[in-house]
Image (spheres, grey):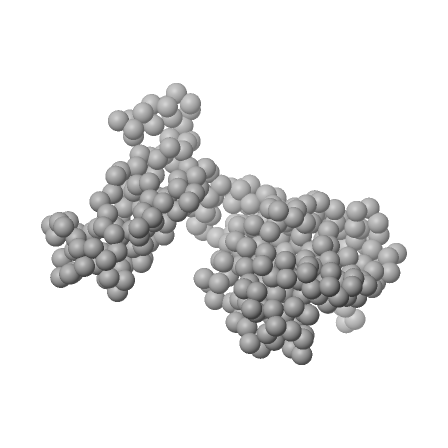
Amino acid sequence: MIRFDNVTKQYPGGTVAVDDLSLTAPTGRITVFVGPSGCGKTTSLRMINRMIEPTTGTISLDGQDTATMNEAELRRGIGYVIQHAGLFPHRTVLDNVGTVPRLLGWDKKETRERSRELLARVGLAPELADRYPSQLSGGQQQRVGVARALAADPPVMLMDEPFSAVDPVVREQLQDVFLDLQGELGKTIIFVTHDIDEAIKLGDQVAVLRVGGKLAQISDPAYLLAHPVDDFVADFVGRDRGYRSLQFQPTPRLPLANERTVVLGESVADLSVPWVLVVDDAHRPLGWVEPSRIDAEVRTEHLHRGGTVARASGSLRGALDAALSSPSRRGVIVDDSGELVGTVRAHEVLSLIEAADRPDEDRASALAEEGS
């Protein structure tokens, strides 16, 4: 557990970066600091490992005041990931990951085994171990940074905008890898971001900070979206917060339709329909095609890949987005293995959303009507 008690950071000249901050980051959970530039997110983070010293107040780690701890020992017990990975350019990927274990006195064989295990865990191929950071993509470098932070199995991790320097697709992949790892390892994490969507996705609790380092609100993501404490928080969270809150509502049984499909490489038999869904040999969706524009078998270049794919076990937001973004206006729904189970239309998902807000007897009636 990390606890801030009335922590203030004031620089010479009078600038206040953090102002009387009090909050608790629970053990084994992700607490996200989010807010506009100048709100003290990074300063608050760096005060935990004493890279910045607070002016007043105390920060405690599992009940111990960090000001009383040896700085080097404190930092070796905390994993730290920054925006551009911060890798040593003259060391191989494997040696970068093993930096802290070697400082802690691990033998070389044990360190290398642990480093290879973590590279696999963050999704990096074994052949990358002997490369140098300059030979990796930005996303690969960030994965190495995460692996390095985990190498000595620290109970606490500090992450300062670790995924903001990569493109949106890679960023989402990194977020998913990070959540998978956290599900396995259960670290106590402080995560800094300026992106409210990232905060909502990753945080068990989200702390919104104002400019000047004042805490505006701290709560779980669902409550934050539904009950912003004031106009500042409401504006920062965004005008579409009602839509985004649907990601916290599990999807009830969807009224799925059996979708006409064609396997990639085959010909479309019926040219009268406007859209046909293309699947692979394992019945996993690949994209949509317009039969009227195809004069032979379906090829990869014919695919319309616009439109998200939602899981039947996912959220209402995922199902609705799949329907709204699909070129056919039919949302593609898959099971947890990625196999197609059917399609759903937006008005059907909206009916389920409306039913979820009704009294139980009305909800049951509405769901029965959808299923009939």
- Coordinates of residue 7 in the picture (x, y in percent): 77, 55
Task: Name the residue rendered at 39%, 20% in the picture.
Answer: 361
Res 153 seen here:
yes
Q: Quadrant of residue 105?
A: bottom right
Task: Establish if 13 lies above or below 195.
Answer: below
Farthest residue toward the front?
A: 109
Image label count: 0
Relative image position of residue 90 (x, y in whole percent): 67, 79
62 relative to 17, above or below: above
Q: Position of residue 130 (x, y in %)?
A: 61, 72
Decide: is 92 above or below 293: below
Q: Relative to 157, say whether 135 is above or below.
A: below
Query: Residue 229's x, y, as percent?
Result: 58, 45
The picture quadrant where one finds residue 45 is bottom right
Q: Residue furthest top?
A: 361
Q: 134 or 372: which is nearer to us? A: 134
User: Residue 17's quadrant in the figure?
Assistant: bottom right
Whether residue 35 is visible:
no
Q: Nearer the viewer, residue 144 or 92?
A: 92
At x 39%, y 47%, the residue is: 338
Question: Is 303 positioned to the left or the right of 102 in the image?
Answer: left
Q: Is residue 351 left or right of residue 156?
A: left
Relative depth, front residue between 7 and 89 = 89
Residue at image location 42% in from the left, 31% down from the top:
357
Q: Quadrant of the C terminus?
A: top left
Q: Residue at x 77, y 57 (%)?
A: 77
